[in-house]
Image (cartoon, coloured by chain):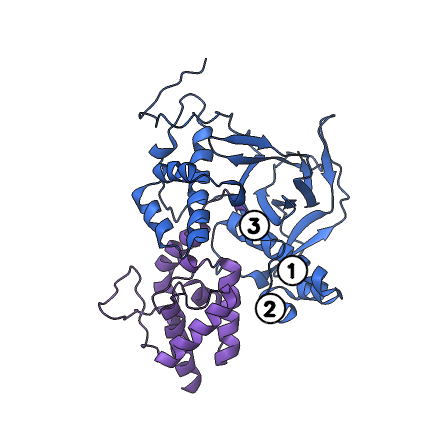
Chain colours: A purple, B blue
Amino acid sequence: MASLTGASLNFTSLSSSFRRTQLPLRGISNVKSVSFPSLRMQPGFRVSCMAKPETVDKVCEIVRKQLALPDGSSLTGESKFAELGADSLDTVEIVMGLEEEFGISVEEDSAQSISTVQDAADLIEMLKEKNNA
Amino acid sequence: MNIRCFPRKFSSALPPLVPLQLPSPMETHLWYILPNEVKSVALLNQYSELLSPCERENVNRMGGDQLKKRALLARALVRTTIARYQTNCQMNPRSLKFRKNIYGKPEIGIDVEGKQRKIKNDIIAFAQRYFSPCEVKLLTAISDSEIQRQEFIKLWTLKEAYVKALGKGFSAVPFKTFTIRFKASTIRCFHLPGNSVSEASEVIVESSDDPKNLPNNWQFALLEVAASHYVAICTEKDKIVGGEANRPMKLTVRKTIPFVEDVCVSGTDAVLVLGGIIEQ
């Protein structure tokens, strides 16, 4: 199957830096990521609860399926979707898969802020807690 | 007179890129590369030399050789393409610096998807979640699942191209808030004799909040390129004072292997116009 690369600016990363600046204005999405082994500080940082291992595993499963990753390929919480070859359509499909699996609803601006497996898992835990509250 | 100056010493192994005139305003140039056509490891290494250390690092972080190659070619394509358009000075693609600017307004958006791309979710469920009611209706009406999948992908690329052209990001203009559709062209087109003008259906965008009132500033091209990919391009329309007439989108498409060959494919089988009023 032929693949084609077009000349265009990398809008995924462009909107990611735009997004991070926007986050403090968005209320519920204002979360700080805590991940081992060190605290990850980012501009407009995000706070979240640490996701359960089962949640991370489930996210990995959905990501594997969506991106058709070869068996045995390494996939961890730190894996970035873009580095696994996901484009914007893949990311939206993954989010939709997560919504169905976990019975949650992810807003567009939260969906845009997910770039790793861990981000997705943390967001899921937060939304699940919101649902239970 | 063209004065050629070399800000840096060229790598002696690479021939200079053929310089080009900048497109005039309201002209769009599309360049693409087919990764399968680039096999030489030596050439790939030379492309790698063009990248900044940061870009090289990003390429190396991609999982797997195919993804690394695609990422490398993408950056090499951007650098070499921009470097061509320096009219007075032969610019070394290596000396370009890129900065991310959150205030940058591109006024052009592009998206590319493989024709054969499989959608993992149910297409109608996906459309109901993300697309406008009008678009859901249109997709639901297609009974052939293969055609439905293709129309879905075309719509996705057009919507992505529009959001990118607006330059505000996916969350600022959620897909649900606008409809993109085809309509038979009823406008008069001016075109120069000898140039081919495709009059496939016009592609228009309507805001869900304000369907008829906003002037339509945007024009689209939907292409099938290299028989394998859908490409959607969205640009601002040329505003003609006083006239009702709309000019076609002037588009030139080139296939390239930087430093090896450039082929203008406009008007050939490699570029099929599926939507939009285009002059090639």
Q: Residue A122's spot in the image, x, y percent?
A: 37, 74
Question: Gap between marks 3 and 1, in whole Å?
Answer: 13 Å
* Frontmost residue, B15 versus B133: B15
Chain ID at mark 2: B
Which of the numbered marks, if any, corresponds to residue B152?
1
Q: Mark 1 Cα within 10 Å, few/some/many (few <14, many 20+)?
A: many
Question: Gap between marks 2 and 3, in whole Å?
Answer: 19 Å
Chain ID at mark 1: B
Task: Please report whichever mark, 1 or 2, sits nearer to the chain's N-terminal start.
Answer: 2
Task: Please report whichever mark, 2 or 3, sits nearer to the chain's N-terminal start.
Answer: 3
Q: Quadrant of residue B130?
A: bottom right
Q: Mark 2 Cα within 10 Å, few/some/many (few <14, many 20+)?
A: some
Q: Which residue is mark 2?
A: B126
For residue B276, say whether it is visible: no
Q: Are marks 1 and 2 in contact (CB under 8 Å)?
A: yes
Residue at 48% across, 74% down: A98
Q: How many marks?
A: 3
* Frontmost residue, B193 versus B84: B84
Q: Residue B141's spot in the image, x, y percent?
A: 75, 66
Q: Are marks 1 and 2 on the same chain?
A: yes
Question: Gap between marks 1 and 2, in whole Å?
Answer: 10 Å
Label 2 residue SS: helix
Amino acid type of the residue that numbered disc 2 sits on in the rendered structure:
Phe
Task: Please report whichever mark, 3 or 1, sits nearer to the chain's N-terminal start.
Answer: 3
Residue at the far left: name it.
Answer: A38
Q: Quadrant of residue B246?
A: top right
Q: Quadrant of residue A50?
A: bottom left
Amino acid type of the residue that numbered disc 1 sits on in the rendered structure:
Phe
Amino acid type of the residue that numbered disc 3 sits on in the rendered structure:
Val
